[in-house]
Image (spheres, rainbow, N blue to C red):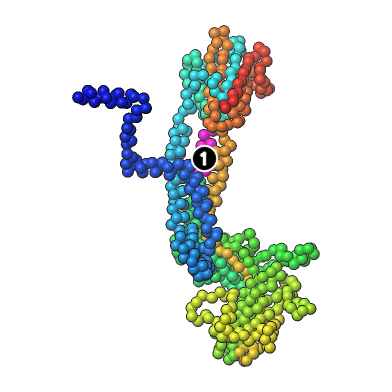
Amino acid sequence: MKQDVSQDTRDTAGAPGARADVVLPSLGVFGTLRWAWTQLTSMRTALFLLLLLAVAAVPGSLFPQRPANPAVVTQYIQDNPDTGPVLDWFQLFDVYSSVWFSAIYLLLFISLIGCVVPRAIAHLRAVRSTPPRTPKRLSRLPVYGTLEVPADRARDAGLTPSSAAEQAAAVLRKRGYRVDVRDAGTDRPSVGAERGLAKELGNLVFHTSLIGVLVSVAVGGLFGYNGQKVIVEGDSFVNTLIGYDSFSPGSNFSDDQLEPYSIRLDSFDVRFDREQESHYGQPLDFTANVTTQDGPGEDEAQQVLKVNAPITIGGTNVYLVGNGYAPVVTVRDGEGNIAQQGPVVSVPSDGLYTSLIVIKAPDAKPDQLGFVGFFLPTAFVDEKGVSFSRDPDPFNPQLNLNSYYGDLGLDDGTPENVYVLDTENLTELNSRNNDDGGIVLGVGQTYDLPEGKGSVTFDGLKRYVALDIHHDPGELGALVFSTLALLGLSASLFIGRRRLWVRTGEHPDGRLMVEYGLLARGEDHRLPAEGAAVEKLLADRFLVPTGSAGDHSHQDAAPAGTGQSHTNAKDKS
């Protein structure tokens, strides 16, 4: 019975169109993990993740980011009650610290490591190994050539197949090849040579440097910080959290990272163009003279801060990013007491430093006082009675203000922009549109407010600078690895990896036969030129009489009686 079943099975399998069922083995947990790891560590996946990371960073420039400006994000959500919460759920306001962005970043990091490590091990083995074995038929290689050394020339020079192979190895070694002499002492010795291993090394350096750049950027994002500070002439800044006007910390930032250095603005000089009519009044140079101190008890140092020329202190780079005027103002309340006194930062709105200014006096009694208007460095009045600035230098500084009294909204703890005055709950005292008119003050002038609310005095004028303070612990690493990546990429693109073999033998009539062949790893349009160079070197060694090698110039055919050389460069396609 068993025999009949087997016979039926064989008949069915042998029938035309018959197909036996194939049972594929299951991968299992280990096999599945191995397959997933193979896919993740492929170069195709690494390139895809790199592109995906670039695409994932796009929302960071389309939507306001909470670490940079949380107030703007809050306002955006309030203005867009339908889409705002949905975008926030997808972490589009925290793109660079979101789960999905971090996942892509981590996968790219793992993928690059998985690509580099096996290739590095394989390259190390290739470096430690000998060049590949000599092919039996060198004539089948893309670039092939032969040299025939006459019997008398070989006899006079004492050339044998073994000595010729050794001399060929010496020639190739000087050209940068690593060589290996095979079958020495036989009648058909050969030389295996290889060069261009730096090409793969450059490739490995490039990919390793990409990992280094990712690590450096991650370190900077985790432990770095960025802050802004406005300093008026004569004032100082101490590197503490409370000293910043705005501060953006990294994900793992700690207060202990702040070095307790200080910066004092001694003077700020601006040089404007006064010679060319077409560029009259345009700024030519900004110079901030500052005094720095690395910490309490340390010696002070005088430094100069310019645009695009930052100073480095306490592990941070300090950049000059803005400047303007700070009128010195004294505000007295209705009881005659000083409610506010000191320089007030104004915000330039044009190239002539026409500046918006807001003054708040929350300590004024019996009512809080507020002022809003503009500052003119060089004030002029046109035929319509409108004041404007005619020059950026302070030749005729002037304050034009509107005044208000009431609740400034500062006592309930709600954050307020110091450069904006909310007049919704205030009562107007002075403006161009009421009977009291606006306030116009020159330096040294005082204006008494209506209804006995107090007075405002324009005491003087100072300059200020806006600083951007940046600390990035991964900055140096990113620079180093970026440079290495560029060098590695250049090496992988411009260095050709080539293999070369030379075989020598003796003809029955006494002639010495030297044949060589070259093979490139990948496409290499410079391989024929390399073959010509190798041919010239071998011809100089074997075909030129002793003492005249320095005068020999390569020819396609050597002079009669000296020897012959033949080269055949084949099209690899």
> Which residue ends up furthest to the front in the rendered image?
16
> Which residue ends up furthest to the top in the rendered image?
509
Above/below status of 500 relative to 264: above
What's the residue at 45%, 39% (across, down)? 120
- Where disc 1 sits, the SS reads helix
Residue 398 vs residue 43: left or right?
A: right
Residue 275 vs residue 402: left or right?
A: right
- The quadrant of the rendering that contains the C terminus is top right
- Disc 1 target residue: 203
Above/below status of 220 relative to 255: above
- The quadrant of the rendering that contains the N terminus is top left
In terms of depth relative to the viewer, which is nearer, 360 or 74? 74
Q: Is residue 267 visible?
A: no
Near mark 1 (Cα within 10 A), the count class, few <14, some 14-19 or many ≥20, is: many
Above/below status of 367 relative to 49: below
Residue 209 image point, x, y percent? 51, 46
Indicate the amino acid at tag 1.
Asn
Residue range (magenta):
196-207
Q: How many marks?
A: 1
Q: Residue 346 colored magenta?
A: no
Residue 471 image point, x, y percent? 52, 60
Q: What secondary structure prevails in the magenta region? A: helix
Query: Quarter of the image holding residue 566?
Result: top right
Residue 246 image point, x, y percent? 53, 68
What's the residue at 61%, 10% (across, down)? 152
In terms of depth relative to the viewer, which is nearer, 234 or 247? 247
Residue 42 image point, x, y percent? 45, 41
